[in-house]
Amino acid sequence: MTESPSESLSDSPFNRNIDDNKNDIVPEIPIEIVSEEEMALLEAALVSARASFSAIPAIRCSTFSFRSNVRSIKSISALSKRRLSGCSEPDIEDSGGLKSAQKKTRMADSFLHRFRKKGLSVTDITATEWCEKQMEFVLLVGKRKVSKAMKKGSARHAKLEEEVVKKVKVRIESIEDRWALKLLNFITGVNQLLSEGLTRELPLIGFAEGVWMVGVVDEIRMPVTETIRNPLLVDTKTRVKDTLPAEPQRRNGRLQLMCYKYMWDDLVADKFPSNKFFDFFSLNPHHILSDEIREMTANSGFPAETLDDVVRYYRNTCGMLSPAHDQLLLRYEFQKDHSLLGEDEFAYDSDWVKNQIQGCLEFWLGEREASYTPEEERWKCGFCQYSSVCPAKNGNHNDPPS
Ligand code: SF4
């Protein structure tokens, strides 16, 4: 058991369990799949990811500002045509200056710029991989409500975390304090991993393919052998039904874990761009942290006065780690009794995950229109809350896999 700091000032207490991935629901939500409970995980993940980027309590209120921006379904069609109309002017685009100006306009109008100014979560990537059109609906229309099954899924993750992590409330007074806490949560979790061989709900903050990204790894295990020091990244999915999910869901889970390994390996290779981090999030590296945080860091053996100090500890901590193990582990658990339904152990594929992230970013950066889920996976539409308004609704609706 290790103590993990969480903030106590705002109405959205940060802690490394729920901040990025699990409970604390915020605006943009990926609609998930067949199982309600997995929806819960995605939603909760996005939520807390949002929270993790919402450096000040005001952003927590973005739930309300987001809702005030809700658009009609009709306007989505209009918006979705913006790229197509741009493509219909090849002669004009021959002009370099104009082309560049158009690219800037697209960027300014992009979903990333409009909805994820502070970066993406890994759940944004997986939800986009599930169906880009659905992700677009989520952004422009809004998410669906959190169901009981979803809440159960989140509660199970909180329970698993409680088994190994004790949360400690810490008062924060500034945006720098908030970020310092996020980084301290990582440091605390890594220390636990190195000393006890296991940690859960570890937040990752990194720079992937040109954008800031956050994620929370369900579980990290240190190998028991002395010779292998590559931590194993594990993700647990709880299932409403006592069956294993279909291949598209497993692929989605594999993508999630591979994104974590991608971020992890970047961090341990000391690729965390500190200056970019301060600039992008408008942070003063020399800001003096709150008394409580300074006292906490001193008691933990790494006295920090400023955010810059914490970032240096963060990078040093990353430097103590090895790249994550090439094998990744997805666990499927029955929600009713927590019994193990099955495990999917698979190898990391760096080219595949990079392509996936880049493909998703094309959508987020406004470089192309949202695509629909492929024909062979149109059974997803039968579980999609937007099927009645989605142009794909007249496509083939196959029975979902059992
Ligand atoms: S109806 Fe199908 S294609 Fe349309 S958004 Fe939903 S899942 Fe995607």
Image (cartoon, rainbow, N blue to C red):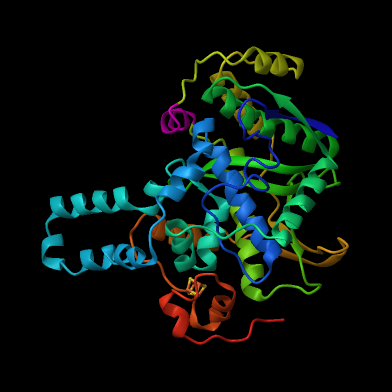
The reply, left or right, for residue 308 in relation to residue 150 is left
What residue is at 85 percent from the left and 37 percent from the top?
196
User: What secondary structure is the magenta-colored segment mainly?
Assistant: helix
Q: Is residue 148 magenta?
A: no
What residue is at 51 percent from the left and 87 percent from the top?
396
Residue 388 visible somewhere in the drawing:
yes
Q: Is residue 280 magenta?
A: yes
Q: Quadrant of residue 88?
A: bottom left
Estimate the x, y position of residue 277 in percent, counting from the top left.
Answer: 47, 32
Compared to residue 372, the image places residue 200 above or below, namely above
Estimate the x, y position of residue 235 in percent, counting from the top left.
Answer: 72, 55
What residue is at 60 percent from the left and 58 percent from the top?
145
Q: Quadrant of the C terminus?
A: bottom right
Of 284 and 138, nearer the camera is 138
The reply, left or right, for residue 66 in relation to residue 152 is left
Residue 271 visible somewhere in the drawing:
no
Q: Quadrant of the N terminus?
A: top right
Q: Which residues are magenta?
A: 274-282
Compared to residue 352, the image places residue 110 above or below, namely above
Compared to residue 6, the image places residue 174 above or below, namely above
Estimate the x, y position of residue 163 in percent, counting from the top left.
Answer: 85, 42
Estimate the x, y position of residue 38 in percent, counting from the top left.
Answer: 68, 62
Total count of labels: 0
